[in-house]
Amino acid sequence: MSEAEDKVRTPQQERSIKTKEAIIQAAMKLFSEKGFHNTNTKQISAEAGVSTGSFYSYFTDKRAVFIDSLKLYNESLLSRVDASLGEVDFTSIDKHAAIAHMVDSLIESHRVYSEFHKELAVMYNSDKEIQSLMDEQFDLGRRKTLSYLQQGQGDLKVDDLEAASWVVFEALNSIVDMIVFSPRNVSADRLKNELVRMIVDYLYK
C-alpha cells in the first residue's frame, strides 16, 4: 500500500459516509458533463461542497473516485433491474409482455446514468482495472440472465441454457445500448418491439 493510500480513511460515522457519497455523486456528475480527463479533484471538491484536503482524506486521486463511481453505477443498475424483474412472474403472464417489461426496465436503468455510461465506454478502452470491473459486471449480467431462464425452464425450447443466456444477454445489451446511446434511423419503439419478438421466438415453445 502506498503512503497516500495509507492515509485514506474508510468512513465509519454517518457524517463521514455522507461526505464520501457526496464526493462520489459530484464526481459522477462532472465526469458525465466534462469527461474524466477534463475533470480535476479541485472541481470535484467544489461540486461536493468539501475542501480539497477533505477529498484527499477519502480518495488518493480522481481515478480512485472514478472507480468508486463505477461501483456505485453497477450497484444501482443491478438493483433497478432486479427490482423491476421482481415485479414479473415469467411463468404466468404473456411472454411478450414479460420480455417487454424487462427491456423497458433495462432502458430506464441505462437512461438514469446515460452520460456517465458514455464516459465509461471511453475509460473501458484506456484503463485495464476499469475494463476488468466492467467485464465482471457483464459476467454478472450473463449469470443473472441464466438464473431467470432456469426459473422458467419448462417453457423453453432451447437445450443449452448457458449458451442461450449469453445470446439473450448480448442481444439485450447491444440493442438497449443502441436505443439509449446511439443515433439511429429506426425508432426506439420499433427496435424494442423487434427485440422482444426475436427473444420470445428464440426462447419459447
Image: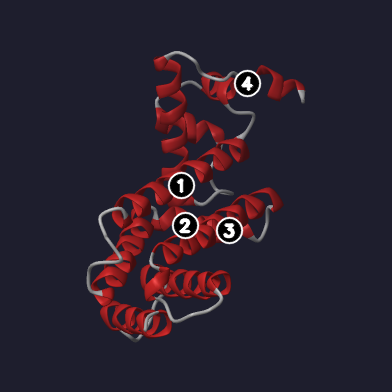
Q: What element carries label 2?
A: helix
Pointers 2 and 1 in contact (CB under 8 A)? yes
Of tags 2 and 3, which is closer to the observer?
A: 3
Q: Earlier in the sequence, mark 3 or mark 4?
A: 4
Mark drawn on residue 8: 4
Of tags 3 and 4, which is closer to the observer?
A: 3
Give the amino acid at mark 3: Asp
Give the residue at mark 1.
Answer: 73
Quadrant where the image shows the N terminus = top right
Q: Which of marks 2 and 4 is nearer the N terminus?
A: 4
Mark drawn on residue 48: none
Give the residue at mark 2.
Answer: 117
- 27 sits to left or right of 37: left
- 2 sits to left or right of 203: right
The Cα atoms of the two marked residues, 2 and 1, are separated by 9 Å
Q: In this view, does 6 lie above or below 149?
A: above
* Residue pictured at 58% horizontal, 58% vertical: 139
Q: Which of marks 2 and 1 is nearer the N terminus?
A: 1
Pointers 3 and 1 in contact (CB under 8 A)? no
Q: What element carries label 3?
A: helix
Give the amino acid at mark 1: Tyr
Query: Residue 134: horizontal and vertical position, in percent?
Result: 58, 54
Mark 2 neighbour density, 10 Å: few (under 14) some (14–19) many (20 or more)? some
The Cα atoms of the two marked residues, 2 and 3, are separated by 17 Å
